[in-house]
Image (tube, rainbow, N blue to C red):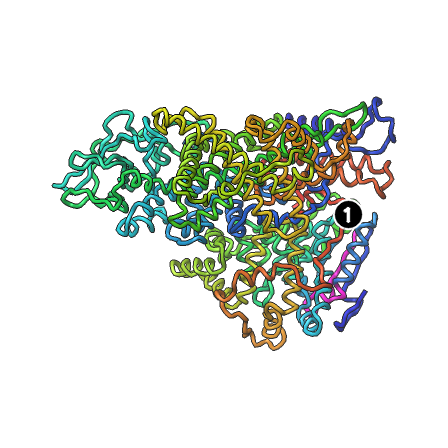
Amino acid sequence: MASQYDRVSFRTQVLTRHLRSPSPSPPPALPDSLSSSPCLSYSPPELSEPPFVFDTKLMRSLLDGHNIQDRDWLFNLMMQSNLFNPRKLGHRTFVSPDHNQSMEQERAMTMKRIEYLLDRGVYKGWITGNGAEAELRKLALNEVISLYDHSLAIKLGVHFSLWGGAIQFFGTKRHHEKWLQITEEYGIKGCFAMTELGHGSNVRGIETITTYDSTSREFVICTPCESAQKYWIGGAANHATHTIVFSQLNINGKNQGVHAFIAQIRDADGNICPNIRIADCGHKIGLNGVDNGRIWFDNVRIPRENLLNSVADVSPDGQYLSVISDPDQRFAAFLAPLTFGRITIAVCAVYSSKVGLATAIRYSLSRRAFSLAANEPEILLLDYPSHQHRLLPLLAKTYAMSFAGNYLKSIYVQRTPEMNKTIHVVSSAFKATLTWHNMRTLQECREACGGQGLKTENLVGHFKSEYDVQSTFEGDNNVLMQQVSKALLAEYVAAKKQKKSFKGLWLEHMNGSSPVIPSQLTSSNLRCSSIQADIFCLRERDLLEHFVSEISAHQKQGRSKEYASVMNYQLAEDLGRAFADKAILLTFIETEAKVSNGPLKNVLGLLRSLYALTILEEDASFLRYGYLSRENAASVRQEVSEPGSSGQSSDLFSHSAVTSASLRLFVILPWGIVATVHHPRRLLRQTLLKLSLSLQPLLHLPAAAQPPLPSSSVTPLVTRRLISSVSSAFKATFTGHNFEDASGMS
Amino acid sequence: MPSSSSTNEAPDQVLVEGHLFVRKIVLNRPMQLNALSNYMISRLLELFIGYEEDPDVKLIILKGNGRAFCAGGDVAAVACDSEGNWRLGAKYFWKEYTLNYIMATYSKPQVSIINGIVMGGGAGASIHGRFRVVTENTVFAMPETALGLYPDVGASYYLSRLPGFFGEYLGLTGTRLDGAEMLTCGLATHFVDSMKLPLLEEALCKINCYDFSNISLIIENHADQPKLKEKSSYHRLDVINRCFSHRTVEEILSALEQESAKKNDDWISAAIQSLNKASPTSLKISLRLIREGRLQGVGQCLVCDYRMTCHAIRGEINRDFFEGNRAILVDKDKNPKWKPSSLDQVSDSMVDRFFSRIDDEDWEDLKLPPRSNLPALAIAKL
């Protein structure tokens, strides 16, 4: 006990020193006046920044797009349960999983959280609901959940979207009646065994084999070799009772391609079923709340009805029947549930970027480093142009990608069979682009937070490993981008062959003549949305034509199209990126058009320009292929580095004064995000909030030196109050109560 | 200060006793259970603003005369005023919410001695303060939904911060709490036997500095640890959480009905009964208010309250406020005819309209007085 008090009084003395400033050295100022040392003067940016110029609620509804009340409801549910580790700090509740737990604990907690949300009716209609409304609700709630914990979202995604989705899409009435309701109620726990050790993205190459035994009317599933073991199957290691098995179907000696079956792998008590072997994939760099496992099938027998038979069936006497004769098309039909997964991954990636940026930008509004001259206050990180240049382009991109994500969701929920190709191409392009952007953003934000970014509880750094998997699962990003350029190629060839105009995928611009970019790009036309769109379209058009001619040149030499596109991977990558960037820009412009004139629209315009110009500056293809002249590229750079300023200045201070107008604009943007994110965790929680925020009331009383009490009478009072407050703050830390409780005030 | 048409305005509705560094404010309208008249609100506002500046005031004690602390706003008078001109009513609420805000962000300690009924506006005048002392005579409720209103006075701020979904339960059903329950759920900070109140007041009046922990200590020395009564619904917080966490009022009601089918508990049937009797529109608004309250500061909550109240007394979206007032307070037939009369007829867009700004040139959002020294955590009292 004694040592605790020693520590308390030691800290008190240290803090008191900050307040008294009796030191002989720098300030010759008023002897007794109180000025708080900058290292104690932390205040959340809300208090020091000017009010927002636009309505943050409107911005939030634009970013979230839909089901805002449902989102808040779910945030509330989490804040109210100890399962989500709520920690109260002042009037805010902070929730975050405890990442200091072992893998086993994390898995058990994930399951408990799933049950809590189940009891509260969160999953109602996730499977049995129909129509756009139910799907949007599910998407919104999933985004909220992923913001809390990626593991929780993925574990739910496996059960609902992959297992449940497979039954919905590949099953027929008998499967729907038997499985959908019980799945929504978690009466069983499903998983999805597609990937094998030897085959991931190339699903058609999987080696698991299923045959049919017409005497017992059963299918027999077999893992013929080690590379055919199912690998990375989420839920398989601990919890799942049932699985969808993807397997080659061999009927009477003929391979009919990949089909999906339902197999039980555990009984209700959690015992592994006969002829099933399961192993754990072990500890991972992230997502340890999900129990990924490996499965072997040793001639497992399942009833004939367990074939998901929407596209093909096997009659009781063993005849193969299918409405789709082309095995290629049959296979394509099997990938439908992965589309939903890709969409959720893409939109969740944006939310994770928002957490990173909100944290890093808030931090840069409170942390100071270096003064420009002696005895001057240190400069806020965000007042450095270099720091702005690190974070704000990422902010603009994140806004752009939010709108792109919303667009993707909207076409998905309104889908018709004709739109399948569009949805596949757009979701592939966005999934890859948005998840790559997320990883880059998190890394930059982590670095921008300095050492604070390394703390798990500040989330930014930890998210890097939690979200890394996004670029791999549900389709490797590189593979997806290749598919995008292949799809564009196919569109082009089809349009030319049938002499039809381009339609869909925003390729209509290919029908007209090539846009002309002004030879001298000025600030105003760089900010013009139609000119931005022109440049992006020009790049895509030219790259596509280039790609087509390269491929046909190869083909003329007698090589296959596949060989040709493998060899032209660089062009294919440039083209995929060009498509994605263009699509994102166009969805941004579309969103902006829907907003009525006013401050909100102005901010959106600024962000859109920052997005477009950042892409222009970053992507080498603009210069490589000459879409931008060197002079124009220079004007782009100029425009990006000094948005809003017309005058030039070499002096940093006047520079920051010049840019302050635009800076202000940017500065408030994160609140738009924060309002959206509602993720209450912020940087500096331990170090500053706990200490100086709780000191804030005291520091503020005298420090607001407008009509204060005579300063001589203040000092002892404040010091004493400071001491008592600091010690109670420490008591709070030791006893685990929050500050207000421990100080005996409530 | 008195400015409106309400009658019986007498300066003795608010009494002030001055002690050395302590001011004791007594709500003195016992016949009306100390319901806050227009005059009383104006006077309290004036006193609180004045005392904040006054270096000689270190502590404010607020109590009520008679068997109530304060039974709420003088709704009947406001309704009567508003029927003619809703702006008169709006003025009343503007002042009342401003008072709530000042109390919630007050830099000096306020001790409310709640020795009797505390409801609606009375809760707004006490819960936002730093110390809330209750006794065995205390009866708390937010009964607004039965009146065609919703828990205003910033209640969406403190109700939403009660454990679990207890706030939704209180706000929607208007359930009454006793002193022990208030202490357990956090609405009260101390429980003191009413016999000891004179001693407590005497001790408090000797205070000469605003050291919160010192005041806390003094009250603690007089406090008791009451026992939660056996039938208290607080014992069933698990059931309350399960039911009142649902997203819509309809779902809450059906969850309650399922629970009552499982096990017939008095408090569940009472809750169902209250929900069925309350204005359907009020229920939906209240739920949304409390939900949004979780993520808002007290100022934002009050701005919301003001919008909603103006809609209610303007009577354009619906007239449940006047109907409730008629049935409960004026005619006392206790049989209000709500319109719309059932939950499914209250559309989301209708609820949205209550949350929107009022389409009227002269109307403006509640402008809260700037609180220059507002520290980041000053607003959290619960």
Left or right for A258, reference B90 = left
- Location of residue A733 (image quadrant): top right
Most foreground residue, A668 or B211? A668
In the rendered view, would you say B66 is above or below B332?
above
Circle 1: residue type: Ile
Q: Looking at the image, can residue A664 be seen? A: yes
Residue A619 x %, y %: 56, 29
Q: Does the magenta stretch include residue B39?
A: yes
- Where does the N terminus of chain A fall, quadrant-wise? top right
* Chain containing mark 1: B
Residue in the image at 43% along x and 43% along y = A422
Residue B96 x %, y %: 71, 60
Spot the residue most to the left: A215
Most foreground residue, B125 or A190? A190
Q: Badge 1 is on which residue?
A: B207
> Badge 1: how crowded within 10 Å, few (<14), some, or many (20+)?
some
Q: Does the magenta stretch include residue A230?
A: no
In the rendered view, would you say B162 is above or below B6?
above
Residue A393 x %, y %: 62, 34
SS at circle 1? loop
Magenta-highlighted residues: B22-40
Most foreground residue, A292 or A388? A388
Left or right for A133, reference B128 = left
Residue B97 x %, y %: 70, 58
